[in-house]
Image (cartoon, rainbow, N blue to C red):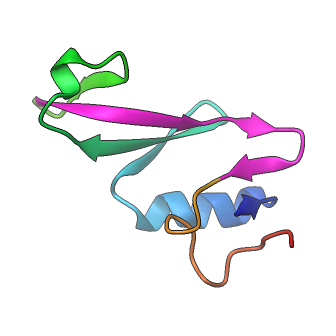
Amino acid sequence: MLVTSLEEMERIVAVRPDLEWDGWNVVKYINSDNAIYSKEGAFKDGKWLKKKVFPLTESGWHLPNHIGREDAQVEG
């Protein structure tokens, strides 16, 4: 899904504890047993997690459908 509104992206991040802002990019943290060995590994809140970064593009943020909410402002 494509989120084109800053306000909607802020709402999505606010209700999802696995998401946070890193500048204009959104980061999703995922539990993983092998995160410590992964190039996507990050140490956060006392444990190793995998992180996936969703950068802001010219058209908005491209997120997997399962992350967004049904009422998110999306494009086609």
Q: Residue at x 34, y 42 (%)?
A: 29
Q: Is residue 57 above or below residue 14?
A: above
Q: How many numbered marks have been drawn onto this rendered protein structure?
A: 0
Residue 42: in magenta span: no
Q: Residue at x 58, y 67 (%)?
A: 65
Q: Residue at x 35, y 15 (%)?
A: 39
Indicate left or right for 71 with 15 as reference. right
Q: Is residue 61 above or below residue 2?
A: above
Q: Name, please, the residue furthest toward the bottom.
A: 71
Dominant SS type (magenta): strand
Indicate left or right for 62 with 27 as reference. right
Q: Residue at x 80, y 49 (%)?
A: 60
Image quadrant where residue 22 sits: top right
Q: Which residues are magenta?
A: 47-62
Image quadrant where residue 26 sits: top right
- The quarter in which the C terminus is drawn is bottom right
- The front one of 21 and 67 is 67
- The front one of 4 and 41 is 41
Residue 51: in magenta span: yes
Q: Position of residue 20 (x, y in %)?
A: 45, 44
Image quadrant where residue 10 sits: bottom right
Q: Is residue 11 above or below residue 10?
A: below
Indicate left or right for 63 with 74 as reference. left
Q: Position of residue 3 (x, y in %)?
A: 74, 60
Indicate left or right for 41 with 32 as reference. right
- The quarter in which the N terminus is drawn is bottom right
Q: Position of residue 4 (x, y in %)?
A: 81, 59
